[in-house]
Image (tube, rainbow, N blue to C red):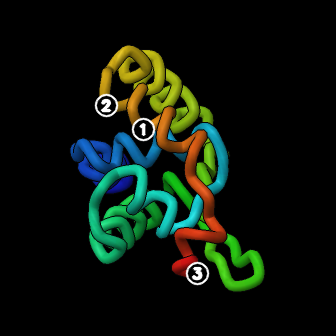
Amino acid sequence: MKELEALLKALADKNRLRILKLLQKRKMCVCELAFILGITQPSVSRHLKRLCCAGIIDSEQDRFWTNYYLKGDSRALKGLLGCLSRRLSGEEIIKKDARKLRKVNRACLCTGR
């Protein structure tokens, strides 16, 4: 019961839902997510920590980047994320995020060039 409660609480935030939709496209770092969402890197990090604690996402090191990605190893989580994905796909903010994702340049964002 506690795991389900943590999962549902983690999903009960607009920015975390947006992060999940973005991570369905590809692995991303904090800089990319902050740029697309238009929020600070510390805010993104707090959202990512909440999603990690709920078992929804995980991370891996890639040179000097930490990439975040959907875990999706449980059937229940896959089903829930599938339902959320279908429901959110028509939202204008999700479409805007997808357009920004196509333009994001990790090297420029993370190194300040």
Q: As shown in the figure, which amino acid type bears the numbered disc 1? A: Asp
Quick check: marks 3 and 1 in contact, CB under 8 Å?
A: no
User: Marks 1/2: CA distance?
Assistant: 6 Å
The x and y percentages for residue 65 are 65, 77
The numbered dot on residue 19 is none
**Image position of 31 with respect to 9: above or below:** below
> Label 1's element?
helix
Residue 71, percent across and down?
62, 51
> In the depicted view, which residue is nearer to us: 46 or 39?
39
User: Residue 56: x percent and y percent?
Assistant: 50, 52
Q: Mark 3 against mark 2, which lies toward the viewer?
A: 3
Residues at circles 1 and 2 in contact by the CB criterion of under 8 Å? yes
Q: Residue furthest right?
A: 63
Q: How would you rate the neighbour count of disc 1 (Cα within 10 Å): few for under 14, some for 14-19, many for 20 or more? A: some
Q: Are marks 3 and 2 in contact (CB under 8 Å)?
A: no
Q: Nearer the viewer, residue 22 or 82?
A: 22
Q: Secondary structure at mark 3?
A: helix
| Disc 3 residue crowd, few under 14, some 14–19, many 20+, Cα 10 Å | few
Q: Nearer the viewer, residue 59 or 7?
A: 59
- Taking 8 as reference, is 96 above or below it? above
Residue extending farthest front: 113
**Of label 3 and label 2, which has the lower sequence position?**
2
The residue sitting at 37% across, 54% down in the picture is: 3
* Residue at 42 percent of width and 38 percent of height: 97
**Amino acid type, callout 2:** Ile
* Image quadrant in which the C terminus is located: bottom right
Pointer 1 residue: 97
Give amino acid for label 3: Thr
Q: Of the numbered discs in the image, which one, if any, rests on residue 93?
A: 2
**Cα distance, mark 3 to mark 1?**
22 Å
